[in-house]
Image (tube, rainbow, N blue to C red):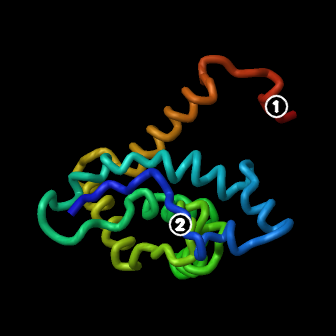
Amino acid sequence: MFKKTQKEIQLGMFSSPTTLLSGRSKTLYEKKDAWHNLFRKEVTMRVDEEIFKDLFCPDNGSPNASIRVLVAMMILKDAQGISDEKLFEDCRFNILIRSALGLMNIDDQIPAVSTYYSLRKRIHEDAKAGNENRLTKVFSEITRQQSLEFNVSGKRIRMDSKLFRQ
């Protein structure tokens, strides 16, 4: 059954890394331009879960794990070139990875391994059936949102950002 993830993140009084860390560690963790905070803001929180809605039964079964977290896990796995085992280890124990995924409390549960594989399988089978790849659709939508927000246009190429080979 499809259930949309809430955008608001509730920090726990005793389980949030911001309350557990202090000094320089806390400052670095909370830094707005730290990679994990940027990834959460610019990628994880921009995932449109509605794209995956029809992969789930509308009225039967228990609610799905957060699609946003599952897709962000897939992106991190591919971006870092790590194994599934390493991905799940990092999701359980690395507070920067957890932050990037929007798991802001130490006791926030990660999706089950079987749920992760089930979604990947559904996406693959759906694409194999001739439908547009949903991950490609998510990337396109995130890129579109970012280009609008940051006023980026591909209509012109700046010469100072073009590399020439000799």
Residue 89 located left or right of residue 30? left
Question: Residue at the location (17% across, 70% down)?
Answer: 61
The residue beneath circle 2 is 103
**Marks 1 and 2 in Cβ contact (< 8 Å):** no
Q: Which of the pair 22/57 is nearer the observer? A: 22
Q: Residue furthest left?
A: 59
Considering only vertical position in the picture, is 112 above or below 75?
below
Mark 2: secondary structure: loop
x 56%, y 35%: residue = 146
- In the picture, the disc for residue 164 is 1
Which percent across, then down, holds residue 53? 25, 52
Query: Which comes sooner in the sequence, label 1 or label 2?
Result: 2
Instruction: Name the foreground residue: 137 vs 99.
Output: 99
Which residue is pictured at 66% across the width and 67% down the height? 96
Q: Residue 47: x and y, percent?
A: 44, 48
Q: Is residue 50 above or below residue 141?
A: below
Question: Which element carries disc 1, helix, strand or loop?
Answer: loop
Q: Residue furthest front?
A: 13
- Say what amino acid the circle numbered 2 marks: Leu
- Horizontally, residue 107 falls left or right of residue 55, namely right
Residue at 70 percent across and 74 percent down: it is 20
How crowded is the residue under tag 1: few (<14 C-alpha within 10 Å), some, or many (20+)?
Answer: few
Whole-percent x, y for residue 62 in the image: 22, 71
Q: Is residue 20 left or right of residue 163?
A: left
User: What label does residue 78 carry, if any?
Assistant: none
Horizontal and vertical percent for residue 90? 60, 76
Tell me: 30 left or right of 98: right
